[in-house]
């Protein structure tokens, strides 16, 4: 998009018959055409040269513009290829950004001496601004790729399947071109066989948020593997964040452990939206509230552990605040709509799908914040017939 806009502006300002943008290819170690338009031959479109060679190579290495008033005598390189297309003059300027050369921008005309010294200075000035935009777009692209890879390691591609439970999840990024966010959820087994549920929300976007989220996810897993319960897991993660992060590094985190044999759910909630427990028998929902403050504010914050007993068929629904704080005008989606979606589903997948449908119906367009949902249902015991 940025490259196209650069060529659009240049072609209009200079009434150029052709324009070419070349960038340095670090893999091939050549300055090569990445985009061109106008009277461009196939040779010009795929042209490349070493730094210091030919007109583009000299401009790239030297960092100074070059103006050629007549290409009629050109016998090699880019000037010769341009002359064969009927182009008679050119101006080539470096793309300099943040102290380094990114490539070369060249305009061509079918008229000899079509460009003045003022034109060359103007193109040189424009190229500096264009180079900064190109470099920024490239940096964003690299950051976004890194963040995407990080988030792929944070959010499971598919939930593990355990015979004692059924589970379903969804992650909804905000907007169409949104940065990677800090929402995460996890489902795994502790060494004692308990099923561990975790969901969290890290403040921020991009690589920084994704890196913190990845650290938290694997810290939770490591602490559970070391035998710590939900309250101690939150305490240790809180201490780690408070001692190593910034005052603005605020995290919400919910960790629970289900003993599928007894149905006991032990959990701790550090400032996260309360989990909802659906009781299949009476058809009612219960709110599993917070047991401690947001993580990261105070290293010695205290976290308590709470417990409930699940009956077979009961379902636990976890979600981030991107769900309840989804807006339509000045109205929030709210916990009430989450509860209604919870009541309409008989399986974990139906609950998640129903909540997603309710969000789609409530919010016109894209969400303002990322949203993550995890539903876990304790399976009903299968009755065994007698022989």
Image (cartoon, helix red, strand yellow):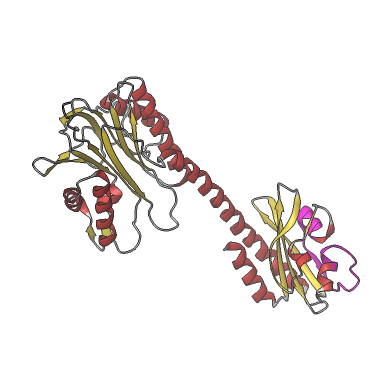
Quarter holding residue 297: top left
Q: Nearer the viewer, residue 181 or 302?
A: 181
Q: Nearer the viewer, residue 164 or 142?
A: 164
**Boundaries of the magenta span:** 56-80
Q: Residue 259: horizontal and vertical position, in percent?
A: 23, 26
Q: Is residue 372 visible?
A: yes
Verify whether residue 68 appears in magenta. Answer: yes
Give left or right: position of 247 versus 111: left
Q: Residue 14: horizontal and vertical position, in percent?
A: 69, 75
Quarter holding residue 156: top left
Q: Residue 141: horizontal and vertical position, in percent?
A: 55, 51
Give left or right: position of 378 versus 25: left
Quadrant assignment for the C terminus: top left
Q: Residue 149: horizontal and vertical position, in percent?
A: 50, 43
Quarter holding residue 165: top left
Q: Is residue 252 visible?
A: no
Give left or right: position of 80 versus 354: right
Q: Nearer the viewer, residue 268 or 372?
A: 372
Give left or right: position of 31 versus 158: right
């Amino acid at each position: 998009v940025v490259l196209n806009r650069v060529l659009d502006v240049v072609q209009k300002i200079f009434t150029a018959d052709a324009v070419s943008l070349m960038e340095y290819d670090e893999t091939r170690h050549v300055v090569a055409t990445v985009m061109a338009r106008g009277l461009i031959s196939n040779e010009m479109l795929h042209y490349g040269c070493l730094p210091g060679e030919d007109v583009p190579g000299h401009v790239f290495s030297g960092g100074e513009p070059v103006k050629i008033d007549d290409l009629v005598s050109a016998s090699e390189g880019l000037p010769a290829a341009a002359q064969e297309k009927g182009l008679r003059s050119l101006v080539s300027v470096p793309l300099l950004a943040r102290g380094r050369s990114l490539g070369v921008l060249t305009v061509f005309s079918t008229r000899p001496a079509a460009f003045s010294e003022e034109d060359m200075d103007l193109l040189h000035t424009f190229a500096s601004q264009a180079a900064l935009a190109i470099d920024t777009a490239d940096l964003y692209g690299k950051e976004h790729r890194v963040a995407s890879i990080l988030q792929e390691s944070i959010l499971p591609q598919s939930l593990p399947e355990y015979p004692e439970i059924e589970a379903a999840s969804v992650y909804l990024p905000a907007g169409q071109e949104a940065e990677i966010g800090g929402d995460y959820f996890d489902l795994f087994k502790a060494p004692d066989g308990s099923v561990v549920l975790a969901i969290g929300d890290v403040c921020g976007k991009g690589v920084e948020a994704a890196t913190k989220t990845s650290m938290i996810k694997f810290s939770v897993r490591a602490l559970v593997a070391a035998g710590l319960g939900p309250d101690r897991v939150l305490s240790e993660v809180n201490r780690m964040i408070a001692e190593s992060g910034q005052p603005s590094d605020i995290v919400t985190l919910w960790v629970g452990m289900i003993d599928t044999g007894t149905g006991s759910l032990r959990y701790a909630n550090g400032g996260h939206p309360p989990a909802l427990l659906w009781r299949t028998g009476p058809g009612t929902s219960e709110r599993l509230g917070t047991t401690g403050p947001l993580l990261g504010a105070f290293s010695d914050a205290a976290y308590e552990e709470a417990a409930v007993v699940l009956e077979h068929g009961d379902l636990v629904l976890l979600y981030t605040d991107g769900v309840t704080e989804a807006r339509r005008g000045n109205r929030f989606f709210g916990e009430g709509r989450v509860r209604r979606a919870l009541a309409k589903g008989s399986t974990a997948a139906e609950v998640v799908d129903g909540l997603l449908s309710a969000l789609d119906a409530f919010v016109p367009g894209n969400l303002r914040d990322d949203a993550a949902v995890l539903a876990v249902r304790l399976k009903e015991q299968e009755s065994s017939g007698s022989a």
